[in-house]
Image: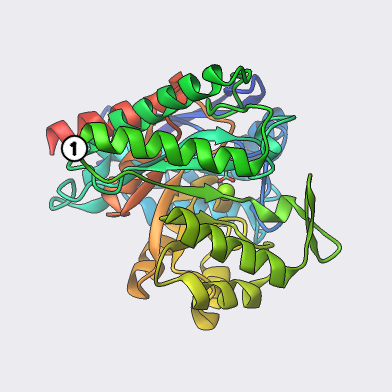
Amino acid sequence: MTRITDIELRRVLDSRGNTTVEADVATTSGGFGRAAAPSGASTGEHEAIELDAADAIERAEEAALPLLESEVDAEDQRAVDAALHEADGTENFSEIGANAAVAISMAAAKAGADSNGVPLYRHLGGTFRGQDMPTPLGNVIGGGEHAAEATNIQEFLSAPVGAPSVEDAVLANAAVHDRIKELLQAEGVPTNKGDEGAWAPPIGDAKAFDIVDEATTAVSEELGFEIGFGLDMAAAELYEDGDYVYDDGVKSTAEQIEYVAEMVREYNLVYVEDPLDENAFEAWADLTDEVGSETMICGDDLYVTNVSRLQEGIDLGSSNSILIKPNQIGTLTDAVDAIELGAEHGIESVVSHRSGETEDTTIAHVAVGAAAPFIKTGTVGGERTAKLNELLRIEGQA
Ligand SMILES: C=C(OP(=O)(O)O)C(=O)O
Ligand SMILES: [Mg+2]
């Protein structure tokens, strides 16, 4: 039996020094799981609600724990997550907090895996999982909401799409990160870092495109496999009164589409996340029509890991990819349902960290367990390498 016996919730620190919720789940068979909620800075307007950590803990202890302790099996993830929804009673976890919900959901999954003596990715995905490993996209230069006085585009991501293994890919992203430091230093540009460990230099977007292009090309030639790059434009953060506002000017929606298409072609971008506002499903469809056969157009704030919003995007042809952040929706069941709905419609999933993270490694297992083709979890920094190193362990085991 893997009946949940006990759940403990506590406050711990995230990588920005803010408090977040950590959950411990224990089962009758001696299984144990621990997980902590991450936290976003450029959050989508339609995300599930993160409460102050202390409030989330108090409310979850009161409403959710009685429905879980001695009531639900940890290995039955759908039952765990259904109990969390029942305890909350809203559409967006505004009663118990998505931070409490996701910490409990992930800790219960780990306790279920531990009770059965299998790795988490196999508990989530079954015995055949672990052969197809996700390609890690690594943030190497960024700004936006993740760093002041840096690029307007939130993330420039190294994308080692030709890497023969996760190990090669992880090392390639670290090498690109390192090469960018050399290029910045050679030009006398300060090498500050943003929230995710990417360089956050005081340069414009155009300069960042050239530096990332030079670094990925050089490292690709050295290592002998293809390394492209991509972007998270986090365009909802640039969007004001119908226009996209950059330091060097303002673009209408049509101009933004034209700009993104030009950059895709000029730099052979392999990936573009959130190129348009989070409610502009139709403009997204126009862009996907134009460049969707050449690059991945990925919805983060657009979909917020929500199957109803994803269905709208599928119906309209808004994108060919979705970002998956379990804390945007509150449970692993909801996150995996979004991956599976996407896969049924040819939408590729990118399982993602948040800018505020902990040493928790659950997303590495979710990516492998749900056979997601990509994972976005940074390049350097302990809370980022925790996930990358876990992927290396999984690759070694599988
Ligand atoms: C990881 C991201 O940032 P945040 O966690 O701040 O939303 C993102 O926008 O993809
Ligand atoms: Mg994003």
| 285 horizontally vs 252: left or right | left
Residue 137 sits above or below residue 125 on the image: above
Q: Report crowding for label 1: few under 14, some 14 to 19, many 20 or more residues within 10 A (C-alpha).
A: some
Which quadrant contains ligand 1?
Answer: top right
**Residue 290 visible in the displayed image:** yes
| 352 horizontally vs 169: left or right | right
| 162 horizontally vs 314: left or right | left
Q: Quadrant of residue 262?
A: bottom right
Residue 221 sits above or below residue 191 on the image: below
| 344 horizontally vs 40: left or right | left
Question: Whole-percent x and y of residue 19?
Answer: 65, 24
Quarter of the image where the N terminus is located: top left
Q: Amino acid at mark 1?
A: Val
Asked if the beta carbon under badge 1 is closer than 8 A to the nearest atom of ligand 1, the reply is no
Quarter of the image where the C terminus is located: top left
Q: Nearer the viewer, residue 81 or 210?
A: 210
Residue 55 sits above or below residue 154 on the image: above
Question: Image point 65% across, 62% down: which residue?
Answer: 276
Question: Image point 80% across, 63% down: which residue?
Answer: 243
Q: Quadrant of residue 240?
A: bottom right
Q: Nearer the viewer, residue 205 or 68?
A: 205
User: Where does label 1 land, which residue?
Assistant: 118
Q: Quadrant of residue 185?
A: top right
